Image (cartoon, grey):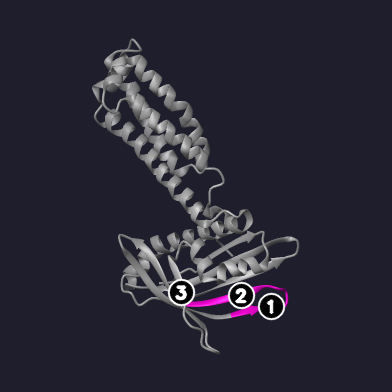
Amino acid sequence: MKHKPIYVEIPINTEMDKIWEATQTPDMHQQWDLRFSSITYLPKIDNEPQKFTYKTKIGFGVQIEGWGESVGSHHAKDGSKTSSLHFGTDQTISIIREGRGYWKYIPNQNEPITFLTQYNYDPSFGKFGSIVDNLIFRPMIGWGTALSFDVLKRWLEKDEKPHSQYIRFFSNSLITFLFFFVWVYHGLVPKLLAMHPEELSMITSVLPLSISDSTFIVSIVGILEVLFGIFWLIYPNKYRLYQLQIILFPLLTLGAVLADQNYLTHPFNPLTFNISLLALSVVGLLNSKDMPTAKTCKRKR
């Protein structure tokens, strides 16, 4: 099965020496590259490639350990640089068996440096591994490479440490998934599947409607909540969604209290629940500006 190489390219407004140091020094490289937890250079032997080992934590105390060697660095007459790598692992749980790739640094007069990579590898586990690699792992590691390149760009251009960038990125991703779950669950379970009596009573206590009409309205509201939850996963501008929720949650709280003040005495009532989500929306709003993203990178040659 043919395996398409991974290609990632990004412009970085910095000096050649700085980007070279950030990508060729193990202690700096492992800070911004999401693909590696640690990189260790082995003692250099004259006239032989620079060898190194790497580790990648995949969760639950499991990590992939591999080897690599810098095949060579080439400095062209136009000032561009190229660093070639050969890498692999002997661990049976790794989907990557062995691969090769390169980094290239292209200076542009009075313009940002073009930093790019292209690499390919042979997957493990035969045909099954190739299918899983093409459908899941290869797109995922390509996305991780692109996100890492953007983190590097922000580090060199804005001096924001990679660690703080990843904290913002993954905390925002966690909040995004939480709001997806909350909206989909509250639209699907109590409104569409169970049609909880309290959902109907909140409508009938405010509007003089029949049970059938109230059921229809609750169903529509449930569908809208499910769609809004899905919107959290697909809409890229989370800043706008946070703004909308900061308006929605006080209105929803006020509507629930006006419908029945007894809700204020319930455990996990609309007041405490919506205020918690409101506070989380404010945190997300403040955290979502200028977020690292893989979308700033060019993914095709």
* Image spot of residue 122 (x, y percent): 41, 74
Report crowding for label 1: few under 14, some 14 to 19, many 20 or more residues within 10 A (C-alpha): few
For residue 144, side relative to residue 110 (left or right): left
In terms of sequence position, does the residue under pointer 2 or pointer 1 come before the other? 1
Name the residue: 55% across, 60% down.
Answer: 149
The stretch of residues the image draws in magenta is 73-86
Of residues 219 and 183, which is closer to you in this image? 183
Give the alpha-carbon distance from disc 3 to disc 2, as whole Å.
21 Å
Q: Main secondary structure of the magenta part?
A: strand
- 76 inside magenta stretch: yes
Residue 8 location, quadrant: bottom right
Q: Which residue is mark 1?
A: 76
State which mark lies toward you, 3 or 2: 3
Dot 3 falls on a residue whose secondary structure is: strand
Q: Quadrant of residue 11?
A: bottom right
**Residue, disc 2:** 82
Nearer-the-camera pick, 273 or 4: 273
Identity, as a three-letter code, of the amino acid under mark 3: Thr
Task: Name which residue lies at 40% across and 74% down.
Answer: 66
> Which residue is identified by label 3?
40
- Image label count: 3
* Quadrant of the rendered image containing residue 38: bottom left
Mark earlier in primary sequence (1, 3): 3
